[in-house]
Image (tube, rainbow, N blue to C red):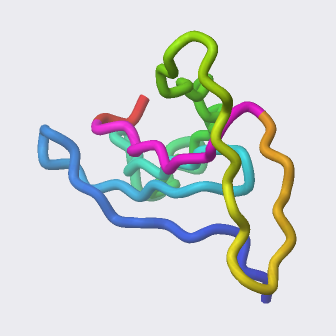
Amino acid sequence: MLQAAKLWERTSARGTKYFSGRLGGVKIVILPNRDFAEGDPARGHSHLMYFADGAPAQPTQPAQPEGAPAQPTAAPAGQRARPQRGGPRRRLPDDVMPF
């Protein structure tokens, strides 16, 4: 078996339990099927999985006084410094409500 994603159980504002996580650059949300009908092949599944673009929003650069030199970032001991593209990475909070 291959682990594809890690999911977290969450509860919506209405009290509905659902799962959310990430698969690479894609957000995943698994919601219970509201139209569940046991024995109906078209509606007999218990959950629905949705994908959404998980690309982070444009990072904001901290304001620097005009003419001030950019401050270099030091790499931890024993590691090479990687060039930064588009500013520092930061963890974005997950959406409070799914879709």
Instruction: Measuring from the top left, give residue 70's x and y in whole percent.
Output: 67, 33
Q: In this view, does 13 lie to the left or right of 24?
A: left
Instruction: Please tell me which residue lies in front, 61 or 29.
Output: 61
User: What residue is at 81 percent from the left and 78 percent from the top?
Assistant: 79
User: What residue is at 35 percent from the left and 54 percent from the top?
Assistant: 18
Instruction: Please tell me which residue lies in front, 45 or 59.
Output: 59
* Magenta residues, dominant SS class: loop
Instruction: Measuring from the top left, give residue 97's x and y in whole percent.
Output: 30, 35
**Residue 88 on the magenta segment:** yes
Q: In which quarter of the image is the C terminus?
A: top left
Picture quadrant where residue 87 is located: top right
Q: Is residue 94 left or right of residue 88?
A: left
Instruction: Please tell me which residue lies in front, 48 or 85.
Output: 85
Instruction: Measuring from the top left, give residue 36's x and y in whole percent.
Output: 39, 47
User: What residue is at 69 percent from the left and 62 percent from the top?
Assistant: 74
Q: Which residue lies furthest to the left in this view?
A: 14
Where 62 sits versus 71, above or below? above
Where 92 sits versus 11, above or below? above
**Residue 21 on the magenta segment:** no
Q: In this view, does 85 lie to the left or right of 74?
A: right
Instruction: Measuring from the top left, give residue 13's x and y in whole percent.
Output: 14, 39
Q: Count the marks.
A: 0
User: What residue is at 64 percent from the left and 68 percent from the top?
Assistant: 5
Q: In which quarter of the image is the N terminus?
A: bottom right
Picture quadrant where residue 53 is located: top right
Where 63 sits versus 43, above or below? above
The magenta-colored residue range is 86-96
Q: Which residue lies furthest to the top in this view?
A: 66
Where 50 sits versus 80, above or below? above
Picture quadrant where residue 94 is located: top left
